[in-house]
Amino acid sequence: MSSRSEEFREFVRDRASPLQQSAYLLCGDWHTAQDLVQETLIKAYRHWPRVRRADSPDAYVRGILLNEMRDRWRRPERAVPVAQFTAEPPVPDSTDDIARRDRLRQALLELPLQQRMTVVLRYLEDMTQVETAKVLGCSEGTVKSQSSRALGTLRKFLTRTESKL
């Protein structure tokens, strides 16, 4: 096996699960998330020498994932409506935690795509403002304003859904 293939396999072993989680948070459907990650990794492998030379191969691949999400978002034949979720895979957890996570995912899907990507990278992937701006290809000020708007929308949504319980 070539060193390129082995190096890529190691990268995938380390990053596939976090990429899957991010993709799910972006689209709200496990099957679509798997497709997004698969397409992302195919593109990353095709361009692995360039990805490997990047300052941060992880950020480069996340950028590919975000572009894949944007492409799917723009296509009119999107399979999953914005606020619809499929059943969450079984996870040992209390029902309150599951319900809370489900409301958070619903709230995320209510956000415009750019705000959703900002929140996922900034708060769920724990990236800095600088890293988030670099991956999204925007300024730090844009990351700040998108984060602020998104958090305000999330607060309103979660407050509204909590009051209905």
Image (cartoon, rainbow, N blue to C red):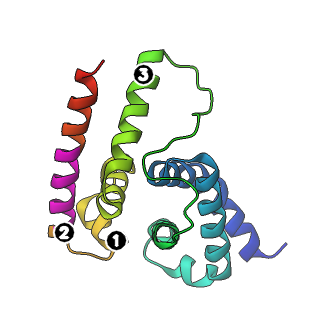
The reply to whether the magenta stretch includes residue 145 is yes
What residue type is disc 1 on? Leu
18 shown above or below 90:
below
Confirm or deny contact between disc 2 and disc 3 (CB under 8 A): no
Label 2 sits on residue? 142
Dot 3 crowding, Cα within 10 Å, few <14, some 14–19, many 20+: few
Label 1 sits on residue? 136
Q: Is residue 98 left or right of residue 161?
A: right
Q: Is residue 107 left or right of residue 145?
A: right
What residue type is disc 3 on? Asp
Stretch of the chain drawn in magenta: 142-153
Q: Secondary structure at mark 2?
A: helix
Which picture quadrant has residue 91? top right
- Residue 88 position, x and y percent, is 57, 34
Label 1 or label 3, whichever comes before in sequence order: 3
Q: CA distance from mark 2 to mark 3?
A: 32 Å
Dot 2 crowding, Cα within 10 Å, few <14, some 14–19, many 20+: some
Which picture quadrant has residue 34? bottom right
Residue drawn where x is 50% and y is 71% of the image = 57
Front-lying residue, 97 or 60 = 97
Label 2 or label 3, whichever comes before in sequence order: 3
Residue drawn where x is 54% and y is 53% of the image = 80
Q: Quadrant of the N terminus?
A: bottom right
**Main secondary structure found in the magenta portion:** helix
Which picture quadrant has residue 163? top left
Q: Which mark is residue 97?
A: 3
